Amino acid sequence: TDLLSTRVKALELPMTIEMSKKSRELAAKGIDVISLSLGEPDFDTPDFIKEAAIQGIRDNYSHYMPVPGYNDLREAIAGKFKRDNNLEYGIDQIVVSTGAKQTLANLMLSLIEPGDDVIVPAPYWVSYVGMIEFCEGNPVVIPTTVESGFRITPEQLEAAITPKTKLMVFSSPNNPSGAMYSQEDLEGIAAVLRNHPDVFIISDEIYEHIRYTTDHVSIASIEGMYDRTATVNGLSKGFAMTGWRIGYMGCPAWLAKACDKIQSQFTSGTSSISQRAAIAAVAAKPSEVQYMVDAFASRRKLMIETFGTLPGFVTRNPDGAFYMFADITALLGKKFGDVVIENDLDLSMYFLTEGHVSSVPGSAFGLPGHVRFSYAASEEDLKEAHRRLENAINQLS
Ligand code: PLP
């Protein structure tokens, strides 16, 4: 290991690894574990998108492509930003990457200097902090609570900004809480940021299409924010395309150019076939994929009625994405036999070993005292998982 760089030695594996290892061990013993720990839709990619990929193969899209993406794909993305987000981006402001994950990595590598403060509201998506630290930035985590709807307030943001603050990274709809920032919430955040013109914003909108209660608003569409925001999106969640690896963003041209430069040295453009498929997906009306959102909406209702009323759980109805994030502090300190459930990791592990339901502890998302359950699963599985969890909780004393 002495050959490894300090950089990579400091990089942590996501906390979910231990859980999935245990989960596999139980499955190998023939125990049927209900997996509610995954962050991916349980649907297949829609046929019209698969057809576009097949056509791309027939048309010999088998060569190197422009690094930031085919022009016709970037034009389709520009059309999508205009149609759904009221944002005007030229194709020189758009970069397509190998998943939103690479989009985010490009942005962090382009923007963060060693020692820069980066504001991250918690709960946050696991990889933000890993990436920030890899870039030698300093994550400044702002915690939220179930009572605040898992959203930061303008006052919290103001208090977190220092002269070293370079960037703020957040997702709405949020993974893991399902919270969404309304127009009014974003106006409040923008009002603070207007007094701090050097703070850039990365707005991760990958769950945009999966929402139930309110409209989605892009912070870049709020007055004064366009020139200082990268609007990140992708096809993994809304189009059930996790394996195709398409992420994209719109941002100021100087930043798109920097991301293009990084990508050209490290990976080149993302898969040509995936890009041909992506044109069909982004050009399609959101109504084409509404059937998936409808299924998630019906499971969400079930989750609110079942998981939402589990003893010791305090939850908030998710506005978007497909997760329920429960405050489980009331269960901490309880015992199973002689074993004390000390924290969210213990509880999540207990749910797995005794309840045979996998989940992800809130610590993985920077908010201990919580557990995340994905409802990208069948209603039958969700009902059975609820029954098992209720039983497991009732065995605690
Ligand atoms: N952003 C958020 C909030 C996510 O939940 C995910 C996936 O879990 C991603 C980004 C990355 O998505 P992908 O790299 O598949 O586009």
Image: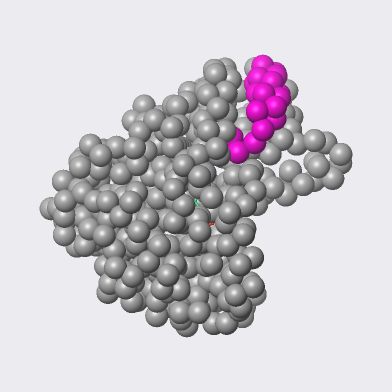
For residue 37, which quarter of the picture?
Answer: top right
| 77 relative position to 346: left or right | left
Q: Nearer the viewer, residue 106 or 98?
A: 98
The stretch of residues the image draws in magenta is 373-395
Residue extending farthest left: 195
Residue 42 visible in image:
yes
What residue is drawn where x is 58% and y is 54%?
A: 48
In the picture shown, does residue 86 fall above or below 61?
A: above
What is the quadrant of the N terminus in the image? bottom right
Residue 119 visible in image:
no
In the picture shown, does residue 169 fall above or below 159?
A: below
Q: Point out residue 295 in the picture as x, y percentages from the top left corner.
A: 57, 33
Q: Point out residue 326 in the picture as x, y percentages from the top left corner.
A: 51, 30
Q: Point out residue 7 in the picture as x, y percentages from the top left corner.
A: 50, 72
- 374 is within the stretch colored magenta: yes
- 378 is within the stretch colored magenta: yes
What residue is drawn where x is 48% and y is 68%?
A: 97
**How many circles with numbers are drawn on the protein?**
0
Q: Nearer the viewer, residue 288 or 167?
A: 288
What colour scheme was applied to this rendering of the protein?
one colour
Q: Point out residue 385 in the picture as x, y percentages from the top left corner.
A: 68, 27
What is the quadrant of the C terminus in the image? top right
For residue 262, which quarter of the picture?
Answer: bottom left
In the picture shown, does residue 386 fall above or below 9?
A: above
What residue is drawn where x is 44% and y is 67%?
A: 73
Question: Magenta stretch mostly in which secondary structure?
Answer: helix
